[in-house]
Image (cartoon, grey):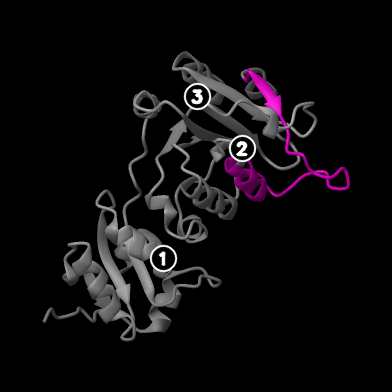
């Protein structure tokens, strides 16, 4: 039986990217692309973490048992960790060329582009919806989008491990590259005359969603082939961007 390390976390390890919660940590352990330096667990969760490691062919010696209060000190005050924490390296992002090459192997596919959506919780929820509705990839602007975080991974319920994410310098330029690769680029705009359920959903589609309130920036909107809106009541001006993304991706995923 493997022995667990009971030492407290060092300050250098505490500064690593920390994923927390049963689902995010389990998904990270099962993701061969994810580099893990240590797995923190409580006495109550250590055996479960070990079982997950063995299933994923990870070294159970990565596990360190520490007191719950020590885990609490590592994380934000409102973090719900359930006795599961992983100190990891950020995932390597994909390139736009990677995604275009992947799209070349598919007859029908869609991807999502976020323009200045900055809340990690919203992005995490959007990532979860992307995986749920078979989105090919998520594209964000490098400058105006938060980097990977424990809160983002938690909000994604671990699905951040499953979705290719691309960070680009210029979204307008990225849209032009996607067009050249056969994508139809559609912007979500609450003032558009056409609703999303009316578009042709076959082929390759890239949807751009802007931040709540401001929407897409002008140059990004100008890069779109067309704009559409969600068919919501006039009583509601807009939806939370994560909710709107889920509805949009559900509609794109329909084939009838």
Q: Nearer the viewer, residue 143 or 237?
A: 237
Of 217 and 56, which appears nearest the observer? 56
Label 2: how many residues lie within 10 Å, few (<14), some (14-19) or many (20+)? many
Mark 3 → mark 1, Cα distance in angstroms:
33 Å
Please, what secondary structure does the residue beneath circle 2 have?
loop
Q: Quadrant of residue 62?
A: bottom left
The answer to whether 81 is drawn above or below residue 129 in the figure is below
Residue 96 in the figure: left or right of residue 243:
left
Q: Nearer the viewer, mark 2 or mark 1?
A: 1
Badge 3 element: loop
Percent across and percent down for residue 179 are 51, 17
Query: Furthest residue to the left?
Result: 1
Q: CA distance from mark 3 to mark 2?
A: 26 Å
Q: Earlier in the sequence, mark 3 or mark 2?
A: 2
For residue 203, the mark is: 3
Residue 105 x, y percent position in the rendering: 34, 26
Q: Which mark is residue 116?
A: 2
Q: Vertical placement of 34 versus 140: above or below?
A: below
Residue 9 visible at all? no
Q: Nearer the viewer, mark 3 or mark 2?
A: 3
Tell me which segment is drawn in magenta: 224-250
Q: Are marks 2 and 1 in contact (CB under 8 Å)?
A: no
Where residue 96 appears, x then y in whole percent?
40, 27
Q: Specify the label residue 23 is tagged with.
A: 1
Give the camera-side residue of 177 and 129: 129
Q: Residue at x 31, y 86 (%)?
A: 43
Distance from the alpha carbon under mark 2 to that under mark 1: 27 Å
- Residue 17 in percent (x, y) is at 38, 57
Check the image and report above or below for 220 versus 134. above
User: Marks 3 and 1: which is nearer the front?
Assistant: 3
């Amino acid at each position: 039986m493997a022995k667990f390390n009971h030492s407290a976390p060092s300050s250098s390890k505490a500064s690593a990217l920390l994923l927390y919660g049963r689902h995010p940590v389990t998904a990270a352990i099962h993701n061969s692309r994810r580099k893990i330096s240590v797995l923190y667990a409580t006495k109550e969760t250590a055996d479960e973490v070990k079982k997950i490691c063995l299933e994923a062919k990870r070294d159970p010696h990565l596990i360190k048992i520490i007191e719950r209060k020590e885990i609490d000190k590592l994380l934000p005050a409102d973090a719900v960790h359930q006795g599961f924490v992983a100190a990891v390296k950020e995932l390597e992002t994909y390139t736009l060329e990677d995604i275009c090459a992947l799209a070349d192997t598919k007859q029908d596919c869609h991807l999502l582009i976020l323009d200045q959506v900055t809340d990690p919780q919203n992005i995490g929820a959007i990532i979860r919806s992307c995986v749920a509705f078979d989105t090919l990839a998520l594209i964000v602007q490098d400058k105006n989008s938060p980097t990977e975080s424990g809160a983002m991974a938690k909000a994604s319920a671990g699905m951040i491990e499953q979705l290719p994410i691309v960070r680009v310098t210029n979204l307008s330029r990225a849209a032009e590259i996607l067009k050249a690769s056969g994508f139809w680029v559609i912007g979500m705009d609450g003032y558009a005359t056409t609703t999303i359920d009316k578009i042709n959903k076959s082929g390759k589609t890239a949807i751009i969603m802007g931040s709540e309130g401001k929407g897409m920036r002008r140059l990004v909107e100008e890069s779109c082939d067309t704009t559409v809106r969600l068919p919501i009541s006039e009583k509601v001006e807009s939806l939370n961007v994560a909710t709107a993304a889920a509805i949009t991706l559900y509609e794109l995923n329909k084939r009838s």
